[in-house]
Amino acid sequence: MLALNEGVLDRTIRIVIGAMLVLFAITIRGGGWAYVGLIPLITGTIGYCPLYALLGMSTYEEREATT
């Protein structure tokens, strides 16, 4: 299993921008470049960015469990 390396805000931004680009490509025929939106959409959905892992970056903050 991949370790999460994207925080909540990071994931939200990726999903929104990715979805907008894909919708643009489908509805307005924005060209093939707009399908690049699949990359942030997928990485935002799974919470793992291979580029972050390669660069040793992470925006993920593990939250403490409250009992």
Image (cartoon, grey):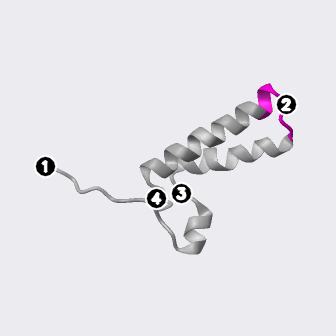
**Circle 3 SS class:** loop
Q: Are marks 4 and 3 in contact (CB under 8 Å)?
A: yes
- Residue 22 location in percent, x, y? 72, 36
- The quarter of the picture where residue 32 lies is top right
N-terminal-most mark, 4 or 3: 4
Boundaries of the magenta span:
25-31
In the rendered view, would you say 54 is above or below 8? below
Q: CA distance from mark 2 to mark 3?
A: 29 Å
Queried whether the magenta region covers residue 24, the answer comes back as no
**Residue at image x 51%, y 48%?**
11
- Residue 48 location in percent, x, y? 53, 57
The type of residue carrying mark 2 is Arg
The type of residue carrying mark 1 is Thr
**Circle 2 SS class:** loop
In the rendered view, would you say 23 is above or below 18? above
Residue at numbered disc 2: 29
Residue at numbered disc 3: 48
Q: CA distance from mark 4 to mark 2?
A: 33 Å
N-terminal-most mark, 4 or 2: 4
N-terminal-most mark, 3 or 1: 3
Q: Are marks 4 and 2 in contact (CB under 8 Å)?
A: no
**Circle 1 SS class:** loop
Residue at numbered disc 4: 4
Q: CA distance from mark 3 to mark 1?
A: 28 Å
